[in-house]
Amino acid sequence: MNRILLIMFCALFAVGLQAQDVIVPISTKSNLMLLHPSREGRLNTVYFGEPLQNEAEYKDVASQFNLRDNNAGIYNAAYTSAGTWNLVEPAIEVVQSDGNTSLELKYVSHTQEKTDDNAMLTVINLEDALYQFEVKLFYKAWTDENVIEQWTEIEHNQKKAVVLKKFASANLFFTGNDFYLTTYGNEWAKEMQRNEEKLTRGIKSIDSKLGTRAYLLQSPNFILSLDNEAAENTGTVVLGQLAWSSNFRYDFEIDSHDNLRFIAGINPFASEYTLQPGETFKTPSLVYVVSHKGTGEASRNLHSWARDYRVLDGNGERLTLLNNWEATYFDFDENKITALFKDAKSLGVDLFLLDDGWFANKYPRNSDNAGLGDWQENKAKLPNGIGHLVSEATKEGIKFGIWIEPEMVNPKSELYENHLDWVIRQPERPEKYFRNQLVLDLSNPEVQDFVFGIVDKLFTDSPELAFIKWDCNSVIYNAHSAYLEKKNIPQTHLYIEYTKGLYKVMERVREKYPEVPIMMCSGGGGRGDYELFKYFTEFWPSDDTDPLERVFMQWNYSYFFPSIVTDCHVTDWSKLPLKYRVDVASMGKLGFDIVAHELNEKDLQFAQEAVQNYNSFKDVVWHGDLYRLVNPYENNFAALMYVSKDKSRAVVFNYLVNFRYMETASRLPVKFAGLDGNKKYTVKELNVYPGARSRIDSTKTYSGDFLMKVGVNPNMSQRNASVILEVNEVK
């Protein structure tokens, strides 16, 4: 027996000595993370910062850390486990099959593989040999964009199930003098409300527990700044989000050495997961970009990554549209809708979108309290069906799209009457409604078939259908699944299995209909993550379409999302002039929610010309590089600039945001960015209202150097509160 123990000790000692020679680099063009096992085999983060010129010195970095697992080794663990040596917030917490709550993960091996010319995938194997428990840490690094996608896979080979109580996607460690965190609180119609704070000793947690409409109260987007407050063009920043369409949790912990630990993953709230032997649990990805030159570079790189690698058809086109919702709400019929086709044609947009209210017969969808779940055309409103509308739109020279909310159900519906077991609800408790509806149980494969069938039938019946708006208005109350109960699966799996079920549906949709554009909507900004963007082409950021509020919202969203995914509509929410409303909506994917034939002559002429102008520069907005020039939180106006990749064209948006008496924008010029200093450019004002005269001399030629160091005054005032400038290279 003593001989066996001696052999085991010698083997472990040899592994420990071997592990000390290991350095695992996670590198991009402008950032380097180094991971290193301690003498005890525990994987630690020993460096996060700008790249080192000499790779031979990577091991010297590790020597600067105390490799024994005292407090330093506790804090900088690359994936902190609970129940043994750890005294801080863990990344993973389990109950072993025998009831033991300890976990001791040691480095075993790692692999690195180039997945293409720009990306490296690193996989690190950790193991608790005592319990045959394995964790794989995945780091996918995109070199040019400085983007890292990080996730974890967990499995075991015990004879019985293990309970996962916490299972983070990532566990990061940063050294620095100070740390600043920017997060974004949400409410309906008040999305992306910025909160910036200096982190102090202790734990700051950000989370969501809402299930489906997960971001109703809290956005998953964050900016972490090291040493100084986040700035546009200077400093080390990390921007990112958990790519997960449900409950999330972030823990930002300043340790006793005043360094920062950051743990991100699925919120363990009501989500203990019973992992069977041989089963693999894969966490969602933490997606983040690192820049040592401020938030401007960081967001431009994140946008490029999103367009090239994540967003469906990220480098493609989008459809401008006219939506009927704010024109008709539920009160419409076939004749009223076909009449609006002429408005779409008159404006010059690509598509007409029919919103909520077109379905259900026994319980007609004439308000939001009935019909949801009964996806047959309402015969009273649409006697000739959706196919007729598609045909009529085609005759008018426009495309046709439609709204659905397939994950939800009204209690007043045939679906509810016939399939109560498909509904998430506590059978012995009073039902709690959100917008008079409940959530269908997508953990159930039959419900997944039903939801896919809604989409499939629409396209089967009307092959020329060109667009879908996919809504999701309700959170999950009274979380309980009749399906999971029937299958003897713990109810704590519901939030996770629901989300996996949604992804399965979207995979089926995209397998059969790979190209149709689909808008992600969730009562406004209740959804918007880089996992769903694998399946959706765009998203609806807020039901608040007041253009003044949208300037601030779209400014904040611009840190995380390229403009090609941000749907911006012109509506009657505001008393500000139509020009201001259109100009604000033009910095994303343009749409309209107005009654065009009721516009006066000049407004209609302006809208038509603005759509033509938008079509001339939309490629720059959708695919160009964004430069935030003037911050509306610090000034009376906002200025943003999109520059084409070849620096031959640019579009500059300027918006007055303070309408108090006698307030104007700065009388100083706005300095441009991103141009070629050696090229010559002209500057022309677009979207000039009929009868008005631009104060910009479009015949004058400027060097790029002049435009970036001196700039151009957009000459804004309360009479001319928005100015769009087109910058073109002189060939």
Image (cartoon, helix red, strand yellow):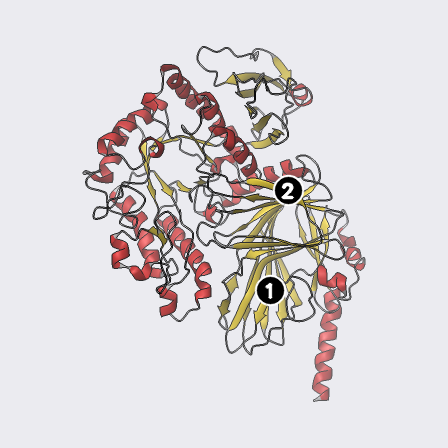
Look at label 2 and name its amino acid.
Glu
Q: Residue at x 27, y 51 (%)?
A: 412
Asked if residue 387 shows in the view, the reply is yes
Q: Work out whether residue 649 or residue 325 is closer to the camera in this orientation and state it.
A: 325
- SS at badge 1: strand
| Image quadrant in which the C terminus is located | top right
Residue 196: mark in rendering: 2
Residue 730: mark in rendering: none
Q: Work out whether residue 405 or residue 285 is closer to the camera in this orientation and state it.
A: 405
- SS at badge 2: strand
Q: Residue at x 54, y 74 (%)?
A: 157
Residue 328 image-quadrant placement: top left
Residue 380, placed above or below residue 643: below
Residue 589 image-quadrant placement: top left
Q: Is 374 placed left or right of 646 in the picture?
A: left
Look at label 1 and name its amino acid.
Ile
Which numbered disc, 2 or 1, marks the residue that appears first in the sequence?
A: 1
Q: Residue furthest bottom?
A: 1
Q: Determine contact: label 2, label 1, CB under 8 Å.
A: no
Residue 584, placed above or below residue 38: above
Residue 501, placed above or below residue 117: below
The percent position of residue 331, horizontal first and vertical second, equals: 27, 35
Q: Residue at x 73, y 53 (%)?
A: 259
- Cα gap from disc 2 to disc 1, whole angstroms: 28 Å
The residue at which mark 1 appears reads as 92
The percent position of residue 205, horizontal first and vertical second, equals: 60, 53
Q: Work out whether residue 511 or residue 230 is closer to the camera in this orientation and state it.
A: 230
- Crowding at mark 1 (Cα within 10 Å: few <14, some 14-19, many 20+): many
Q: Work out whether residue 142 or residue 64 is closer to the camera in this orientation and state it.
A: 64
Q: Is 635 placed left or right of 620 in the picture?
A: right
